[in-house]
Image (spheres, rainbow, N blue to C red):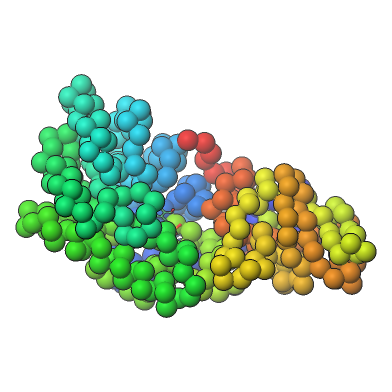
């Protein structure tokens, strides 16, 4: 029994440190720059663990993260969401307080907005071009001649220090096994090398920045790229374990919940962790149709023969056979290993840090945009 009000977000310090060290060492061994994403946790304590206990280059998904980490000493930041023109003034203010703030564009329209801002205020922005390596979320098509024209326009614009090409293989999350993930990893790395080669000798040294946890976990070395930006690997989650990015023992986080309703006749329990504690991410249901909304374990993280089948705002509905349900009376604590740790972590203002079964610290992530 852990002495915490539930639902509570638990982070296992030892597993977290191990995950951080493994990925960092792989990047060092591969001789590439390491710019981990901090969007998964948004906590500067974990940002430092990602860099072996100190500050270093990071990737963020909001300006609020960038400002928060900058205040805590992180000086080299990539904001890896295409910049909204209305955010340029805020980004410019931040850029003046750090060594480097890289922004991302994937359109002529965004470049024009940067150039207008430059004309009015004189600031030159460090920019990356977002390239689509098959995820089809954001980014230019590397096979379209207009994309090379946009890259060359960035390179020649007086408003821009053109830093490089950036891609994220989010479609690796749809793969069914490590073999398929490795194929996507190879495509991700190749997409940027091929595209850079089209841009000519003058741009032969711009950075090729890649990153997703499935692809970077599935390969032994990072080849054919200059920088990696993994995020989820710090925590991993039930999805990543199902996909094979990690083993179940590598998942560093869980949500502590209490049984508040026990109905053996109906074959169900209710726990006090609903959608606002866990998020409604469906998990790797393309691999395991019974994934539910997270894996149900006891307090010692032993999986139970129970499935989390439905979530409403503050209720989680758990199904099992009547004998199994009866073994978990009202007041029992359970832990739910989340499907998607980034979204689940974002539900909590406090992370309870656990070591050797005891709560040893509290961390407070940044929230908002
Ligand atoms: N880079 C970008 C642009 C992203 O959007 C993300 C995640 O969404 C990442 C890197 C990190 O991906 P992951 O959390 O799979 O490591």
Report the residue that reaches farthest toward the top.
120
Q: Quadrant of ligand 1?
A: bottom left
- Vertical side of 90 occupied by 246: above or below: below
The quadrant of the image that shows the N terminus is: bottom right
- Vertical side of 279 occupied by 328: above or below: below
Report the residue that reaches farthest toward the bottom.
179
Is any part of residue 52 visible from this angle? Answer: no
Q: Residue at x 25, y 47 (%)?
A: 128
341 or 8, which lies in front?
341
157 or 13, which lies in front?
157
When asked about the image quadrant of residue 285, the answer is bottom right
Q: Residue at x 56, y 67 (%)?
A: 286
Q: Where residue 219 sits: x, y (%)?
A: 37, 74
- Vertical side of 43 occupied by 368: above or below: above
Q: Where residue 70 sits: x, y (%)?
A: 39, 39
When asked about the image quadrant of residue 239, the answer is bottom right
């Amino acid at each position: 029994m852990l002495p915490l009000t539930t639902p509570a977000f638990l982070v296992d310090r030892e597993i977290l440190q191990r995950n951080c060290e493994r990925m960092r060492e792989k990047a060092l061994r591969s001789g590439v720059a390491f710019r981990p994403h901090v969007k998964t946790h948004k906590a500067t304590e974990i940002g430092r663990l990602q860099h072996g206990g100190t500050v270093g280059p990071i990737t963020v998904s909001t300006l609020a993260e960038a400002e928060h980490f900058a205040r805590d000493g992180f000086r080299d930041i990539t904001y890896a969401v295409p910049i909204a023109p209305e955010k340029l003034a805020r980004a410019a203010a931040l850029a003046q307080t750090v060594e480097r703030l890289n922004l991302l564009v994937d359109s002529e329209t965004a470049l024009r907005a940067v150039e207008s801002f430059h004309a009015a205020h004189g600031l030159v922005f460090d920019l990356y071009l977002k390239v689509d390596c098959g995820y089809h979320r954001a980014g230019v098509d590397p096979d379209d001649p207009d994309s090379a024209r946009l890259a060359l326009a960035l390179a020649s614009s007086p408003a821009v220090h053109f830093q490089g090409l950036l891609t994220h293989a989010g479609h690796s999350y749809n793969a069914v096994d490590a073999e398929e993930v490795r194929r996507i990893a190879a495509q991700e790395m190749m997409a940027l090398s091929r595209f850079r080669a089209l841009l000519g000798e003058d741009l032969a040294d711009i950075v090729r920045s890649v990153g997703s946890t499935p692809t970077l976990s599935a390969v032994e070395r990072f080849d054919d790229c200059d920088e990696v930006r993994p995020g989820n690997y710090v925590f991993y989650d039930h999805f990543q374990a199902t996909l094979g990015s990690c083993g179940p023992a590598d998942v560093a986080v869980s949500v502590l919940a209490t049984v508040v309703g026990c109905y053996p006749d109906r074959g169900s329990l209710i726990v006090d962790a609903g959608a606002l504690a866990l998020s409604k991410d469906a998990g790797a249901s393309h691999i395991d149709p019974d994934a539910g909304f997270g894996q149900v374990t006891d307090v010692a993280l032993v999986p139970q023969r129970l499935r989390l089948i439905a979530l409403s705002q503050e209720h989680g509905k758990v199904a099992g056979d009547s004998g199994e349900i009866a073994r978990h009376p009202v007041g029992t604590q359970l832990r739910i290993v989340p499907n998607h740790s980034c979204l689940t972590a974002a539900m909590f203002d406090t992370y309870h840090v656990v070591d050797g079964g005891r709560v040893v610290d509290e961390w407070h992530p940044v929230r908002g945009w």
